[in-house]
Amino acid sequence: MRDLANAPPAIFGGTAEALELARRIPGAVLLLPPGERRPPGVPGSFETADISADWLARTGVFGLIIAPHPFGAESARAAAAAADEQGVPRVFLRRPGWRAPRGARWHRARSAEQLPRLIPAGARIFAATGRDDLAALRRLNARVFLRRISGPPEPIPGVIAVAGTPPFTVREEMRLFRRLGIDWLVLRDAGGPGARPKLDAAHRLGLRVALIDRPAWPDGPCVTTAEEALQWLSRTIPSAASS
């Protein structure tokens, strides 16, 4: 039987919401997915690893907030399975997707594999989807520019790498799209404010947007904001959510 009075809550994920929770919950244990670095200004203990039932048992946490990237369905599923195996209460934190402004020229794709059906030959595309969709992007009969947000733009076969350091403003994105002659923007529907300037810039310039739908997540309790996650935690471990 776990001692709720002394058990720390855990947060799994490197999203802005996960990091906000790590700052606001005293004693929380932050587990970052492999490959992610601890950002500055996040107190408390943290690790970088795949989540597992053994990890939950070793750390003795009670209450798990699962907040990976909205496209991290597999890691969310693994985290939920680990929590269920250990009998740890858990909740998904999945921020809402973007809503199109009136008159926006958005086109939905169930996956990156559908992009060739949406985007015509000869298009000039700006993609901010990451390397996972490279194979689909290379199959397009188009000029594809792919944003790189870390390090200098290295050669990537089949696409043109464009360096950039976030955050980006709408005005900056508009200048970039004009300079590159972009007529299509390709994004995953991640939601949140980070990539929103690209969408707003595309809308102001009248560009078409191919928005890739999110994968289905596993069933279970779900919240959409850090504040809602704190409310869930206060119901689960009342002493843990007080800041």
Image (tube, helix red, strand yellow):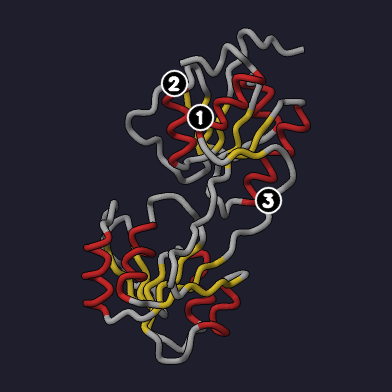
User: Is 236 situated left or right of 124 in this image?
Assistant: right
The residue indicated by pointer 1 is 30
At horizontal 29% and vertical 68% (from top left) the residue drawn is 162
Q: In the image, what residue type sits under mark 1?
A: Leu
| The quadrant where residue 2 appears | top right
Disc on the earlier residue, 2 or 1: 1
Marks 2 and 1, how far apart at CA:
8 Å
Please indicate, yes or no, whether residue 159 appears anywhere in the rendered image.
Answer: no
Residue type beneath disc 3: Trp
Q: Work out which quarter of the rendered image holds the C terminus and state it.
A: top left
- Type of residue at label 2? Gly
Q: Nearer the viewer, mark 1 or mark 3?
A: 3
Circle 3: is it few (<14), some (14-19), or many (20+) Cα within 10 Å?
Answer: some
Is 66 placed left or right of 145 in the picture?
A: right
SS at mark 2 in the image: loop
Q: Which residue is mark 3?
A: 217
- Using the image, determine if residue 71 lies above or below residue 242: below
Count of numbered tags: 3
